[in-house]
Image (tube, grey):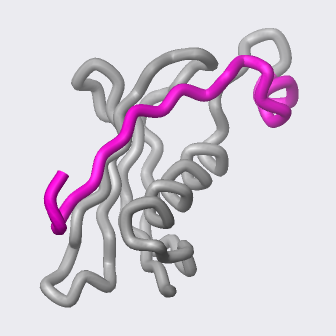
Amino acid sequence: MNGSGFEQALCIDAKHPALPGHFPGQPLVPGVVLLEQVALALRAWRGQRLTRVLEAKFVAPLLPNEAAMLRLMEADPAGSRIRFEIQRDGTLLARGVVEGTT
């Protein structure tokens, strides 16, 4: 994407260590793992580390090994706040606003 946005595909492997406890027998990718992906994308896009999660809403589950798309967009003209969305096949899974710093 251009300077005001970034996107990357994501897929959480079924062997991820957080999955057996969330939930045994029917694993879902935990929200904290999705936020970790947001942090990694922010680092890749801007070289920043995530410092605060201002808002996070998880609206649909992501299952292990499912492909999804993570998008980051500037949320304000100064670029200090970043909006994120995670979608799978056009279905919104998560959205929110974060802040980062160098």
Residue 67: in magenta span: no
Residue 13's x, y, as percent? Answer: 67, 22
Residue, x 54% and y 61% (percent of image)? 39
Residue 10's place in the image compared with 41, above or below, is above
Residue 95's x, y, as percent? Answer: 36, 51
Residue, x 53% and y 26% (percent of image)? 11
Residue, x 37% and y 63% (percent of image)? 45
**In the rendered image, which quarter is residue 15 located in?**
top right
Magenta-drawn stretch, dominant element (helix, strand or loop): loop
Of 31 and 8, the residue lying toward us:
8
Magenta residues, as a range? 1-23
Residue 68's place in the image compared with 84, above or below, is above
Asked whether, in this view, residue 63 is left or right of residue 20, the answer is left
Residue with the most extreme top position: 25
Asked whether, in this view, residue 94 is left or right of residue 36, the answer is left
**In the rendered image, which quarter is residue 4 located in?**
bottom left
Residue 32's place in the image compared with 22, above or below, is below
